[in-house]
Amino acid sequence: MGQARLEEVRKLLRRIVDVRDDEIRAMLLACAYFFFVLAGYYIIRPLRDEMAVAGGVSNLPWLFTGTLTVMLAANPLFAALVAKLPRVLFVSLTYRFFALNLLVFYILLSFSSEAQSIWIGRVFYVWASVFNLFVVSVFWAFMADTFRPDQGKRVFGFIAAGGTLGGLTASALTAGLAEYLGPINLLLAAGILLEAAVQSMLRLSKTAPLPAAFSIPEPPPPVENPAYDLPLTVPTVRPGTREYPIGGSAFAGIRNVMRSPYLMGIAAYMLLFTITATFLYFQQAEIAESYFTSRPMRTAFFARIDVLVNLLTLLIQVFLAGKVIRLLGIGLTLALLPILCIVGFSVLGISGTLAVLIIFQALRRAANFALARPAREVLYTVLTREDKYKAKTFIDTFVYRGGDQIGAWSYAAMSAIGFRAGQIAFTAVPLAIAWLIVALWLGTKQSRHGRTPS
Protein backbone atom coordinates (compact mmCIF):
# COMPACT_ATOMS: atom_id res chain seq x y z
CA MET A 1 0.00 0.00 0.00
CA GLY A 2 2.83 2.37 0.91
CA GLN A 3 4.65 1.60 -2.33
CA ALA A 4 1.46 2.19 -4.34
CA ARG A 5 0.97 5.59 -2.75
CA LEU A 6 4.59 6.46 -3.40
CA GLU A 7 4.15 5.62 -7.07
CA GLU A 8 1.04 7.83 -7.21
CA VAL A 9 3.06 10.72 -5.79
CA ARG A 10 5.76 10.12 -8.38
CA LYS A 11 3.24 10.13 -11.21
CA LEU A 12 1.70 13.36 -9.92
CA LEU A 13 5.10 15.04 -9.70
CA ARG A 14 6.02 13.91 -13.22
CA ARG A 15 2.81 15.51 -14.52
CA ILE A 16 3.67 18.82 -12.87
CA VAL A 17 7.44 18.94 -13.44
CA ASP A 18 9.84 17.20 -15.82
CA VAL A 19 11.66 15.20 -13.14
CA ARG A 20 13.29 11.76 -13.34
CA ASP A 21 12.62 9.11 -10.71
CA ASP A 22 16.19 9.24 -9.40
CA GLU A 23 15.91 13.03 -8.96
CA ILE A 24 12.65 13.15 -6.99
CA ARG A 25 14.08 12.69 -3.50
CA ALA A 26 16.78 15.33 -4.01
CA MET A 27 14.26 17.74 -5.52
CA LEU A 28 11.83 17.36 -2.61
CA LEU A 29 14.59 17.79 -0.02
CA ALA A 30 15.72 20.93 -1.87
CA CYS A 31 12.12 22.18 -1.72
CA ALA A 32 12.02 21.55 2.04
CA TYR A 33 15.38 23.30 2.49
CA PHE A 34 14.13 26.40 0.64
CA PHE A 35 10.75 26.25 2.43
CA PHE A 36 12.44 26.71 5.81
CA VAL A 37 14.87 29.36 4.56
CA LEU A 38 12.16 31.62 3.12
CA ALA A 39 9.71 30.91 5.94
CA GLY A 40 12.30 32.30 8.33
CA TYR A 41 12.95 35.29 6.11
CA TYR A 42 9.27 36.14 5.60
CA ILE A 43 8.76 36.33 9.33
CA ILE A 44 11.62 38.84 9.46
CA ARG A 45 10.79 40.83 6.32
CA PRO A 46 7.64 42.72 7.45
CA LEU A 47 9.26 43.49 10.80
CA ARG A 48 12.31 44.88 8.98
CA ASP A 49 10.14 47.00 6.66
CA GLU A 50 8.10 48.36 9.56
CA MET A 51 11.26 49.29 11.47
CA ALA A 52 12.50 51.17 8.41
CA VAL A 53 9.31 53.24 8.32
CA ALA A 54 9.40 53.79 12.11
CA GLY A 55 12.97 55.06 11.81
CA GLY A 56 11.95 57.56 9.13
CA VAL A 57 11.73 57.02 5.36
CA SER A 58 14.18 59.90 4.90
CA ASN A 59 16.82 57.80 6.70
CA LEU A 60 16.53 54.85 4.32
CA PRO A 61 19.49 55.91 2.12
CA TRP A 62 21.72 55.85 5.21
CA LEU A 63 20.48 52.39 6.13
CA PHE A 64 21.31 51.26 2.60
CA THR A 65 24.81 52.72 3.00
CA GLY A 66 25.24 50.83 6.26
CA THR A 67 24.10 47.63 4.58
CA LEU A 68 26.60 48.03 1.74
CA THR A 69 29.42 48.64 4.24
CA VAL A 70 28.57 45.47 6.17
CA MET A 71 28.35 43.52 2.90
CA LEU A 72 31.83 44.71 1.93
CA ALA A 73 33.23 43.44 5.22
CA ALA A 74 31.23 40.19 5.24
CA ASN A 75 32.13 38.94 1.76
CA PRO A 76 35.85 38.20 2.37
CA LEU A 77 34.96 36.54 5.69
CA PHE A 78 32.43 34.27 3.99
CA ALA A 79 34.85 33.53 1.13
CA ALA A 80 37.49 32.56 3.70
CA LEU A 81 35.04 30.04 5.21
CA VAL A 82 34.38 28.68 1.72
CA ALA A 83 38.13 28.32 1.11
CA LYS A 84 38.88 26.50 4.36
CA LEU A 85 35.80 24.41 5.20
CA PRO A 86 33.77 21.73 3.36
CA ARG A 87 30.52 23.15 1.99
CA VAL A 88 28.25 21.29 4.43
CA LEU A 89 30.15 22.78 7.36
CA PHE A 90 30.31 26.38 6.15
CA VAL A 91 26.64 26.34 5.10
CA SER A 92 25.64 25.02 8.54
CA LEU A 93 27.77 27.63 10.31
CA THR A 94 26.29 30.44 8.21
CA TYR A 95 22.67 29.59 9.07
CA ARG A 96 23.37 28.92 12.75
CA PHE A 97 25.26 32.20 13.07
CA PHE A 98 22.21 34.09 11.81
CA ALA A 99 19.91 32.08 14.11
CA LEU A 100 22.04 33.12 17.10
CA ASN A 101 21.80 36.75 15.95
CA LEU A 102 17.99 36.48 16.01
CA LEU A 103 18.10 35.42 19.65
CA VAL A 104 20.28 38.45 20.48
CA PHE A 105 17.87 40.84 18.71
CA TYR A 106 14.92 39.25 20.51
CA ILE A 107 16.55 39.95 23.88
CA LEU A 108 17.55 43.51 22.96
CA LEU A 109 14.14 44.47 21.55
CA SER A 110 12.30 42.87 24.47
CA PHE A 111 14.05 45.05 27.06
CA SER A 112 14.57 48.31 25.14
CA SER A 113 12.77 51.62 25.54
CA GLU A 114 10.86 53.23 22.65
CA ALA A 115 13.82 55.46 21.77
CA GLN A 116 16.27 52.60 22.02
CA SER A 117 14.07 50.36 19.87
CA ILE A 118 14.31 52.90 17.02
CA TRP A 119 18.11 52.58 16.94
CA ILE A 120 18.04 48.83 17.48
CA GLY A 121 15.51 48.69 14.65
CA ARG A 122 17.93 50.48 12.33
CA VAL A 123 20.66 47.99 13.19
CA PHE A 124 18.16 45.19 12.67
CA TYR A 125 17.25 46.60 9.25
CA VAL A 126 20.89 46.49 8.14
CA TRP A 127 21.32 43.01 9.62
CA ALA A 128 18.14 41.67 7.98
CA SER A 129 19.19 43.13 4.62
CA VAL A 130 22.48 41.24 4.88
CA PHE A 131 20.79 38.11 6.24
CA ASN A 132 18.25 37.67 3.45
CA LEU A 133 20.81 37.90 0.67
CA PHE A 134 23.35 35.58 2.27
CA VAL A 135 20.96 32.79 3.26
CA VAL A 136 19.24 32.77 -0.15
CA SER A 137 22.49 33.09 -2.09
CA VAL A 138 24.03 30.20 -0.13
CA PHE A 139 20.95 28.10 -0.85
CA TRP A 140 21.12 28.66 -4.61
CA ALA A 141 24.89 28.14 -4.66
CA PHE A 142 24.25 24.77 -3.03
CA MET A 143 21.64 24.02 -5.72
CA ALA A 144 24.03 24.99 -8.53
CA ASP A 145 26.60 22.67 -6.96
CA THR A 146 24.10 19.80 -6.61
CA PHE A 147 22.21 19.83 -9.94
CA ARG A 148 23.56 19.83 -13.49
CA PRO A 149 22.59 22.61 -15.96
CA ASP A 150 20.03 20.41 -17.72
CA GLN A 151 18.51 19.43 -14.38
CA GLY A 152 18.41 23.05 -13.24
CA LYS A 153 16.34 24.06 -16.24
CA ARG A 154 13.82 21.35 -15.42
CA VAL A 155 13.57 21.46 -11.61
CA PHE A 156 14.76 24.86 -10.34
CA GLY A 157 11.34 26.40 -10.91
CA PHE A 158 9.67 23.70 -8.83
CA ILE A 159 12.35 23.92 -6.13
CA ALA A 160 11.72 27.66 -5.97
CA ALA A 161 8.06 26.82 -5.28
CA GLY A 162 9.15 25.21 -2.02
CA GLY A 163 10.53 28.56 -0.92
CA THR A 164 7.41 30.37 -2.07
CA LEU A 165 5.24 28.01 -0.05
CA GLY A 166 7.41 28.73 2.97
CA GLY A 167 7.13 32.47 2.38
CA LEU A 168 3.37 32.21 1.92
CA THR A 169 2.95 30.22 5.13
CA ALA A 170 5.13 32.57 7.16
CA SER A 171 3.54 35.72 5.66
CA ALA A 172 0.04 34.50 6.50
CA LEU A 173 1.05 33.63 10.07
CA THR A 174 2.85 36.95 10.53
CA ALA A 175 -0.10 38.93 9.14
CA GLY A 176 -2.49 37.10 11.46
CA LEU A 177 -0.36 37.03 14.60
CA ALA A 178 1.67 40.26 14.49
CA GLU A 179 -1.02 42.38 16.15
CA TYR A 180 -1.81 39.74 18.80
CA LEU A 181 1.55 38.25 19.80
CA GLY A 182 3.71 41.21 18.89
CA PRO A 183 6.19 41.04 15.97
CA ILE A 184 9.25 40.69 18.22
CA ASN A 185 8.09 37.33 19.61
CA LEU A 186 8.07 35.89 16.11
CA LEU A 187 11.86 36.23 15.87
CA LEU A 188 12.31 33.04 17.88
CA ALA A 189 10.21 31.11 15.35
CA ALA A 190 12.47 32.41 12.55
CA GLY A 191 15.52 31.02 14.36
CA ILE A 192 13.93 27.59 14.70
CA LEU A 193 13.13 27.57 10.99
CA LEU A 194 16.76 28.27 10.14
CA GLU A 195 17.82 25.17 12.10
CA ALA A 196 15.20 23.16 10.17
CA ALA A 197 16.83 24.46 6.97
CA VAL A 198 20.20 23.16 8.16
CA GLN A 199 18.74 19.71 8.83
CA SER A 200 17.17 19.61 5.34
CA MET A 201 20.48 20.64 3.78
CA LEU A 202 22.32 17.87 5.62
CA ARG A 203 19.87 15.25 4.34
CA LEU A 204 20.12 16.63 0.80
CA SER A 205 23.93 16.45 0.90
CA LYS A 206 23.65 12.72 1.70
CA THR A 207 20.99 12.10 -0.95
CA ALA A 208 22.85 13.94 -3.73
CA PRO A 209 26.54 13.89 -2.76
CA LEU A 210 29.27 15.52 -4.80
CA PRO A 211 31.20 13.39 -7.32
CA ALA A 212 34.20 11.53 -5.92
CA ALA A 213 36.51 14.09 -7.56
CA PHE A 214 35.31 16.65 -4.98
CA SER A 215 35.72 14.46 -1.88
CA ILE A 216 38.40 13.00 0.33
CA PRO A 217 38.70 9.20 0.44
CA GLU A 218 37.83 7.76 3.82
CA PRO A 219 40.86 6.04 5.43
CA PRO A 220 40.73 2.27 4.88
CA PRO A 221 39.81 0.10 7.87
CA PRO A 222 42.65 -1.65 9.70
CA VAL A 223 43.07 -5.40 9.16
CA GLU A 224 44.35 -7.62 11.94
CA ASN A 225 47.58 -9.53 11.22
CA PRO A 226 47.21 -12.88 13.00
CA ALA A 227 50.99 -13.38 13.20
CA TYR A 228 51.96 -10.09 14.81
CA ASP A 229 48.58 -8.74 15.92
CA LEU A 230 49.39 -5.37 14.28
CA PRO A 231 47.02 -3.30 12.10
CA LEU A 232 47.93 -3.43 8.44
CA THR A 233 46.75 -0.97 5.78
CA VAL A 234 44.50 -2.31 3.06
CA PRO A 235 46.04 -1.37 -0.32
CA THR A 236 42.69 -0.44 -1.92
CA VAL A 237 40.90 2.91 -1.45
CA ARG A 238 37.16 3.16 -0.99
CA PRO A 239 35.07 5.86 -2.75
CA GLY A 240 35.27 9.30 -1.15
CA THR A 241 32.64 10.24 1.38
CA ARG A 242 33.98 13.44 2.91
CA GLU A 243 34.02 16.65 0.87
CA TYR A 244 37.18 18.67 0.71
CA PRO A 245 37.25 22.49 1.00
CA ILE A 246 36.98 24.45 -2.23
CA GLY A 247 40.18 26.35 -1.39
CA GLY A 248 41.50 29.44 -3.14
CA SER A 249 41.72 33.04 -2.04
CA ALA A 250 39.18 34.93 0.06
CA PHE A 251 39.14 37.58 -2.68
CA ALA A 252 38.82 35.16 -5.61
CA GLY A 253 35.12 35.94 -6.08
CA ILE A 254 35.77 39.64 -6.62
CA ARG A 255 38.77 38.99 -8.86
CA ASN A 256 36.97 36.43 -11.02
CA VAL A 257 33.96 38.70 -11.55
CA MET A 258 36.24 41.47 -12.81
CA ARG A 259 38.01 39.10 -15.22
CA SER A 260 35.01 37.30 -16.71
CA PRO A 261 32.65 39.04 -19.21
CA TYR A 262 30.03 36.40 -18.40
CA LEU A 263 30.16 37.11 -14.65
CA MET A 264 30.23 40.85 -15.35
CA GLY A 265 27.06 40.39 -17.40
CA ILE A 266 25.36 38.62 -14.47
CA ALA A 267 26.53 41.45 -12.19
CA ALA A 268 25.08 44.05 -14.58
CA TYR A 269 21.76 42.18 -14.68
CA MET A 270 21.69 42.12 -10.87
CA LEU A 271 22.65 45.81 -10.60
CA LEU A 272 19.86 47.00 -12.92
CA PHE A 273 17.35 44.69 -11.24
CA THR A 274 18.20 46.12 -7.83
CA ILE A 275 18.19 49.80 -8.81
CA THR A 276 14.69 49.54 -10.24
CA ALA A 277 13.51 47.47 -7.26
CA THR A 278 14.79 50.16 -4.90
CA PHE A 279 12.84 52.88 -6.72
CA LEU A 280 9.68 50.84 -6.27
CA TYR A 281 10.50 50.03 -2.63
CA PHE A 282 10.87 53.72 -1.74
CA GLN A 283 7.52 54.55 -3.29
CA GLN A 284 5.91 51.71 -1.35
CA ALA A 285 7.46 53.01 1.91
CA GLU A 286 6.16 56.54 1.27
CA ILE A 287 2.63 55.31 0.59
CA ALA A 288 2.62 53.05 3.66
CA GLU A 289 3.75 55.95 5.82
CA SER A 290 0.89 58.14 4.58
CA TYR A 291 -1.86 55.49 4.69
CA PHE A 292 -1.13 53.65 7.96
CA THR A 293 -0.46 55.29 11.29
CA SER A 294 0.35 52.43 13.69
CA ARG A 295 3.33 50.09 13.58
CA PRO A 296 1.31 46.83 13.86
CA MET A 297 -0.95 48.01 11.02
CA ARG A 298 2.04 48.67 8.77
CA THR A 299 3.59 45.30 9.67
CA ALA A 300 0.32 43.55 8.78
CA PHE A 301 0.04 45.56 5.53
CA PHE A 302 3.52 44.52 4.38
CA ALA A 303 2.78 40.91 5.34
CA ARG A 304 -0.48 40.94 3.30
CA ILE A 305 1.42 42.14 0.24
CA ASP A 306 3.79 39.22 0.81
CA VAL A 307 0.81 36.83 0.91
CA LEU A 308 -0.45 38.14 -2.44
CA VAL A 309 3.01 37.90 -4.00
CA ASN A 310 3.62 34.38 -2.75
CA LEU A 311 0.22 33.08 -3.87
CA LEU A 312 0.80 34.36 -7.39
CA THR A 313 4.39 33.13 -7.39
CA LEU A 314 3.42 29.66 -6.22
CA LEU A 315 0.88 29.21 -9.02
CA ILE A 316 3.43 30.23 -11.66
CA GLN A 317 6.23 28.11 -10.19
CA VAL A 318 4.23 24.90 -9.87
CA PHE A 319 2.38 25.01 -13.18
CA LEU A 320 4.32 27.29 -15.54
CA ALA A 321 7.94 27.99 -14.57
CA GLY A 322 9.57 24.81 -15.90
CA LYS A 323 7.55 24.92 -19.11
CA VAL A 324 8.29 28.62 -19.70
CA ILE A 325 12.04 28.18 -19.17
CA ARG A 326 12.17 25.18 -21.53
CA LEU A 327 10.01 26.90 -24.15
CA LEU A 328 11.59 30.37 -24.12
CA GLY A 329 15.12 29.49 -23.05
CA ILE A 330 17.19 31.29 -20.43
CA GLY A 331 17.60 34.60 -22.29
CA LEU A 332 13.94 35.26 -23.03
CA THR A 333 12.89 34.10 -19.57
CA LEU A 334 15.35 36.57 -18.04
CA ALA A 335 13.96 39.25 -20.36
CA LEU A 336 10.37 38.92 -19.09
CA LEU A 337 11.08 40.86 -15.89
CA PRO A 338 12.62 43.96 -17.53
CA ILE A 339 9.77 43.97 -20.08
CA LEU A 340 7.27 43.98 -17.20
CA CYS A 341 9.18 46.84 -15.56
CA ILE A 342 9.17 48.93 -18.75
CA VAL A 343 5.38 48.67 -18.79
CA GLY A 344 4.92 48.92 -15.01
CA PHE A 345 7.03 52.02 -14.44
CA SER A 346 5.39 53.72 -17.42
CA VAL A 347 1.92 53.12 -15.93
CA LEU A 348 3.12 54.12 -12.46
CA GLY A 349 4.47 57.36 -13.89
CA ILE A 350 1.07 58.16 -15.38
CA SER A 351 -1.06 57.04 -12.43
CA GLY A 352 0.82 56.60 -9.15
CA THR A 353 -2.06 55.31 -7.03
CA LEU A 354 -1.91 52.76 -4.21
CA ALA A 355 -3.77 50.18 -6.33
CA VAL A 356 -1.36 50.55 -9.28
CA LEU A 357 1.66 50.26 -7.01
CA ILE A 358 0.36 47.13 -5.28
CA ILE A 359 -0.47 45.43 -8.59
CA PHE A 360 2.90 46.35 -10.12
CA GLN A 361 4.81 45.32 -7.00
CA ALA A 362 2.99 41.99 -6.80
CA LEU A 363 3.50 41.17 -10.50
CA ARG A 364 7.13 42.25 -10.46
CA ARG A 365 8.09 40.25 -7.38
CA ALA A 366 6.12 37.20 -8.55
CA ALA A 367 7.80 37.30 -11.98
CA ASN A 368 11.18 37.58 -10.30
CA PHE A 369 10.69 34.71 -7.84
CA ALA A 370 8.87 32.39 -10.24
CA LEU A 371 10.73 32.96 -13.51
CA ALA A 372 13.71 35.32 -13.43
CA ARG A 373 15.29 33.89 -10.27
CA PRO A 374 15.31 30.20 -11.35
CA ALA A 375 16.57 31.23 -14.81
CA ARG A 376 19.28 33.39 -13.25
CA GLU A 377 20.42 30.50 -11.04
CA VAL A 378 20.81 28.27 -14.11
CA LEU A 379 23.44 30.78 -15.29
CA TYR A 380 25.67 29.64 -12.42
CA THR A 381 25.44 25.91 -13.10
CA VAL A 382 28.08 26.17 -15.87
CA LEU A 383 30.67 27.80 -13.58
CA THR A 384 33.51 26.34 -11.52
CA ARG A 385 32.75 25.36 -7.91
CA GLU A 386 34.78 28.31 -6.63
CA ASP A 387 32.73 30.76 -8.69
CA LYS A 388 29.46 29.12 -7.62
CA TYR A 389 30.15 30.04 -4.01
CA LYS A 390 32.54 33.01 -4.09
CA ALA A 391 31.70 34.97 -7.25
CA LYS A 392 28.00 34.21 -6.93
CA THR A 393 27.87 35.33 -3.30
CA PHE A 394 29.75 38.54 -4.17
CA ILE A 395 27.22 39.30 -6.92
CA ASP A 396 24.18 38.28 -4.87
CA THR A 397 25.22 40.35 -1.87
CA PHE A 398 27.65 43.18 -2.55
CA VAL A 399 26.59 43.94 -6.12
CA TYR A 400 22.94 43.60 -5.10
CA ARG A 401 23.36 46.05 -2.23
CA GLY A 402 25.48 48.28 -4.46
CA GLY A 403 22.44 48.60 -6.70
CA ASP A 404 20.38 49.40 -3.60
CA GLN A 405 22.85 52.15 -2.77
CA ILE A 406 22.73 53.67 -6.24
CA GLY A 407 18.95 53.46 -6.31
CA ALA A 408 18.51 54.88 -2.79
CA TRP A 409 20.72 57.93 -3.21
CA SER A 410 19.48 58.56 -6.76
CA TYR A 411 15.90 58.51 -5.47
CA ALA A 412 16.84 60.83 -2.60
CA ALA A 413 18.64 63.21 -4.96
CA MET A 414 15.72 63.35 -7.41
CA SER A 415 13.30 63.96 -4.53
CA ALA A 416 15.54 66.74 -3.19
CA ILE A 417 15.53 68.62 -6.50
CA GLY A 418 11.77 68.41 -6.75
CA PHE A 419 11.02 65.27 -8.78
CA ARG A 420 7.62 63.83 -7.98
CA ALA A 421 7.05 60.07 -7.60
CA GLY A 422 5.64 59.77 -11.13
CA GLN A 423 8.65 61.50 -12.66
CA ILE A 424 11.03 59.22 -10.77
CA ALA A 425 9.08 56.23 -12.10
CA PHE A 426 9.70 57.41 -15.67
CA THR A 427 13.48 57.57 -15.06
CA ALA A 428 13.43 53.81 -14.40
CA VAL A 429 12.17 53.03 -17.93
CA PRO A 430 15.53 53.52 -19.77
CA LEU A 431 17.23 51.47 -17.05
CA ALA A 432 14.78 48.64 -17.70
CA ILE A 433 15.54 48.83 -21.44
CA ALA A 434 19.28 48.44 -20.75
CA TRP A 435 18.42 45.58 -18.41
CA LEU A 436 16.47 43.86 -21.22
CA ILE A 437 19.50 44.00 -23.52
CA VAL A 438 21.76 42.44 -20.85
CA ALA A 439 19.23 39.64 -20.27
CA LEU A 440 19.19 38.63 -23.93
CA TRP A 441 23.00 38.70 -24.10
CA LEU A 442 23.31 36.48 -21.02
CA GLY A 443 20.97 33.92 -22.54
CA THR A 444 23.20 33.66 -25.59
CA LYS A 445 26.37 33.33 -23.52
CA GLN A 446 24.88 30.67 -21.23
CA SER A 447 23.90 28.45 -24.11
CA ARG A 448 27.44 28.68 -25.51
CA HIS A 449 29.03 27.81 -22.16
CA GLY A 450 27.12 24.53 -21.95
CA ARG A 451 28.87 22.47 -19.31
CA THR A 452 32.23 24.12 -19.74
CA PRO A 453 33.19 26.14 -16.65
CA SER A 454 33.72 29.86 -17.15
Image (cartoon, rainbow, N blue to C red):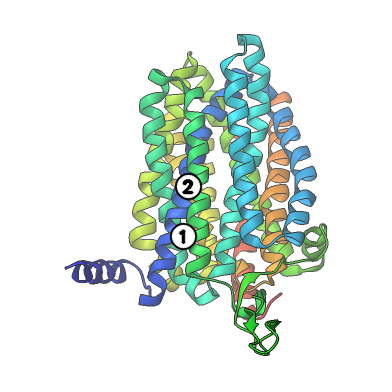
Does 346 sit left or right of 420 as displayed?
Answer: left
Residue sitting at x 37%, y 40%: 169
Answer with the quarter of the image where residue 161 lies: bottom left
Q: The disc labelled 1 sits on which kind of residue?
A: Ala
Check the image and report above or below for 174 versus 197: above
Where residue 196 is drawn, which disc sits there? 2
Disc 2 residue crowd, few under 14, some 14–19, many 20+, Cα 10 Å: some
Residue depicted at x 42% and y 23%: 178
Amino acid type indicated by mark 2: Ala
Residue matched to label 1: 30
Q: Secondary structure at mark 2?
A: helix
User: Residue drawn 63% across and 34% down?
Assistant: 101
The mark closer to the camera, 2 or 1, is 2
Q: Position of residue 399 (x, y in %)?
A: 72, 50
What residue sits 54% from the left and 61% below the top? 335
Q: What is the crowding at mark 1: few (fewer than 14 residues within 10 Å), some, or many (at least 20)?
A: many
Whole-percent x and y of residue 117? 62, 16
Tell me the distance, in whole angstroms, between the alpha carbons under discs 2 and 1: 12 Å
Residue 333: where, in percent of width, then height? 50, 64
